[in-house]
Amino acid sequence: MNDSLRHVMVVLLGCFTLLFVQLNRVQILEAESLKDNPANTRTVQREFNRPRGDIVTSDGVVVATSVETPGQRFGRQRTYPEGPLYAHTVGYLSFNLGADGAEKVFNTELTGSTAAQQLADFTSLLDPDPDGGSITLTLDDQLQKVARDALGERPGSVVAIDPRTGAVRALWSYPSFDPNLLATNDGAAANASYQELLGADGNPLRAKAYKDREFPGSTFKLITAAAALESGAATLDEPVFEATSSYTPPLTTNPITNFSGGPCGGNLTTILARSCNTPFAELAAETLGPLVMVNQAEAAGFNTEIPFDLPGAAVSNYPTDYGKRIQAPNAERPAGLYENTPKLAQTAIGQNDVQASPLMMALVAAGVANDGVIVKPHVLAEVRDATGKVVRSNEGEEWRMSMRTENARILQQAMIEAADRGNTATVDGLRIGVKTGTAQLGTDPPRSHAWIVGFGGRADGEPELVVSVLVEGQEGSVDQTGGAVAGPIARALFTEWFGRG
Amino acid sequence: MAPRRLELGLLILGTLITALAYGLLNIDDTVNARADVAVFFGVILLLLLGAHLVIRFVAPNADGLLLPLAALLNGLGYVVIARLDPGLADSQAAWTFIGIGAFSAVLLLLPDLRWVADYRYTLALLGVVMLLLPLIPGLGRTINGARIWLRAGPFSIQPGEFAKIVLAAFLAGYLTDKRELLTISNRRLGPLNVPDFKHFGPMLLALGVALMVMVLQRDLGSSLLFFTLFLVMFYVATGRAAYVAAGLVLFSVASFTSWQLFSHVQRRVDIWLNPFADPKDKGFQIVEAWFALADGGVTGTGLGAGLPTKVPYAETDMIFAAIGEELGLLGATAVLAAFMFLVASGFRVAASANVPFEKLLATGLTALLGFQAFIIIGGVLRVLPLTGVTLPYVSYGGSSLISNYVILALLVRISDSSARSEAAAAAATAQPVPV
């Protein structure tokens, strides 16, 4: 029997040898391709189990943090103590849905994996699994709450930026969403919430403040006015535009009228302060021409990606195609005549195909407020390592020159006049300049976007805060002006910002 | 080295390895093992020393490798189970105590096994009844599609785990009795000379019932294990390869037929051949097991540092994947090596046994341990279709742990008995009794 016993043993040991060979195949030969298999979620899951730092506002409020969740699908879960308030800035980190916002773009900073964070602590250089880092935002929690409360439950956006540094101080869109719903370890619940949000009224997932574009209306006249100043077509006092109540561009019979319906005119600062339509339309169509207008819009950042540090900022649009030139410039019409000159007249007052995000209009105002220099907008203030030491801080850098300093100063003056005239955004003791806009969307029922962009500073100081407010699709037209609807929101922001000790 | 000193040394070494692994769980803060490592070490060592003392007293000449190898596998399995699901650790600890208790009890209560052969037909009946019990309505319960469990208060018992021992004992007794007859071919079946059919009768009946029960209970792994047990014992008893060939033909026909007849068998085969066709549903378990093994690489992620809980049934059927992930190719190879040593020791016991019944029983029991490990590890590694059997001594589960310790005790008993009769024979030749 021992011979056959030996045979059985050889067979069984052969079986085990086969297992050993196959084990080597799986664990070594095929390991890499198994790790790359699209069905393999282990790499993502490990990422989720790693320590991840907090996201904090400039005034120290924690807006994103990790809590340990022992025994759950992942060892940690992201929570957002302020709920919807920072959803469009911070975004979310969700196993099922991926990441968005600051959670997405500052992932390496939050996991403590940047070179600067690792160099700061030599021991962590050897650590494949660093202890996480944290980031501080430029946003101010008090100002953010004022923005939210002032807008209330009206669809719209509020952006506040320091024009000198590009630091975004408030960034709010309504409706917003609670990122905690998407970050939960309960994958099924996260998916269900996401589907619900996708179908919800007003698309709460969308950070409209920088991702959506709308008709800027009269706020765009800042660009047209800058074009007139930069091209030399106008100065502070000259020319005095004739007060007209209607302007019909060449090649069309559709007249452009003023908002009030009556005549409107004066020097550049006056027509800007009064937001006259007819002189701006005529100025662009007859005097400035497409080239000057396009150049000025693009100098302010239209048709270009905004170097914002949150993902997906919309490119604002100013039309560049006005057809063939059909008449050369002459003394009577220095702009020359183009097939689409009527369109040019409409773009000059922010209509036709002009589309701008609230962030873009904030940057237009920031260019004026900062004497012509637009600084890159950003929400990241500081990056810290696991011990809390600052390893990088963002002081802001110049993006572009939108106009010459003296012309910016003229526009500042015009905006201050506009603010005093409207008197809905002004605050006693502050130097405040604004430009309002009311973009009519339709007549049945009449609805309009109410805009205001502006700057504020102390009585004799430079502008320190720029705001851009859009209240969308308000029913009504004549009464729902930017000044009446959006002005008080700007005022609330200035009051909060400058009202501190 | 004397077997008992070897055994003691290896038990201490194995316990040290187990305790160190347990200590590693405490280092990583994702898993909180509750007990103090020193206490853990002490308790296990005391438990194993108890078993060692029992061997010293009632089976002093037995093989010294069997208990340390089983204890090492049991210890590693416990640590992995505690890491996977701390809630299961306490009951696995209790089953370990009961298992070692059963090991000692078998050694103390059965000083001699030869009488067992006389009760071979009783054993056959007992084995069949044990297998049939779960099919009785109200008594059996179905877990994960297999009706192989018995309700027993808060516990579930798998009588099949014990039936396999009983059936191995029956086969050993029956084949001891009939092997001479089975080697004489006095009938012709086509071109083959075969023994008289009447000698096969009872055995084919027992095997047929066992296989039928397996199909009815949908426990393909145990079915395969029983069939292998039958083939191995028949071959060792008769030494005739023709039986093995006939058995394999029979097996192929049976496999093909059940593949055609049963959708659950087709499903198993589909998953085996191409698990990546449906990695999120049908192939999920095996695909996740392979992802776990790939993550482990050569050295493993380290205990407590991997994601082994992603694999369904990681504490039972898939425990080898958890070991491969966290302990790497090295740890998984160590487990394979431990089984190879265990199998080699078992066959050495069988080879040195000089009572035919003991030899065949040792062969059967060793084959049960070795092939059960091969069937489940082969299932995880896709050498075979995956069928749910436990990895002996390693997987979570009371029935499996206790029955495998009973197998170990029987091997130890046979080993001691052969060594003793050898010594007696040697003494007899060395010192002739004066007339």
Image (spheres, coloured by chain):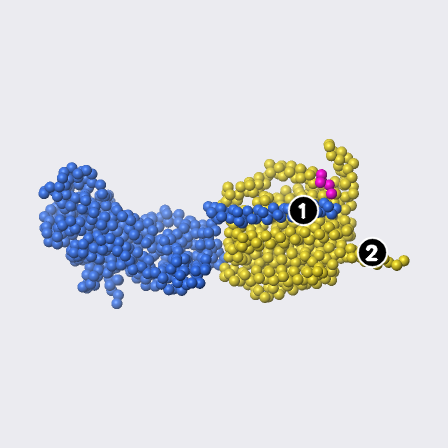
Chain colours: A blue, B yellow
Amino acid type indicated by mark 2? Thr
- Residues flagged by tags 2 and 1 on a common chain: no
Task: Between residue A497 and residue B149, name the one nearer to us.
Answer: A497
> What's the residue at 77%, 43% (across, down)?
B178
Residue A202, given in percent of the width and then of the height, sits at 32, 49
Q: Which three-letter amino acid code belongs to the residue tagged 1?
A: Val
Q: Label 1: which residue? A: A10
| Secondary structure beneath label 2 | helix
The answer to whether residue B32 is above or below residue A216 is below
**Local crowd at mark 2 within 10 Å, few (<14), some, or many (≥20)?**
few
Residue B429 disc label: 2
Judging from the image, what secondary structure is the residue with disc 1 in? helix
Q: Which residue is drawn at 28% across and 55% down?
A: A377
What residue occupies the far right of the structure in this picture?
B435
Chain hosting mark 2: B
Q: In which quarter of the image is the N terminus of chain B?
A: bottom right
Nearer to us in this view, B272 or B98: B272
Residue at (43% x, 52% y) in the render: A95
Span of residues in magenta: B239-243
Q: Where is residue A5 in the image (x, y as percent from the top left)?
A: 71, 47
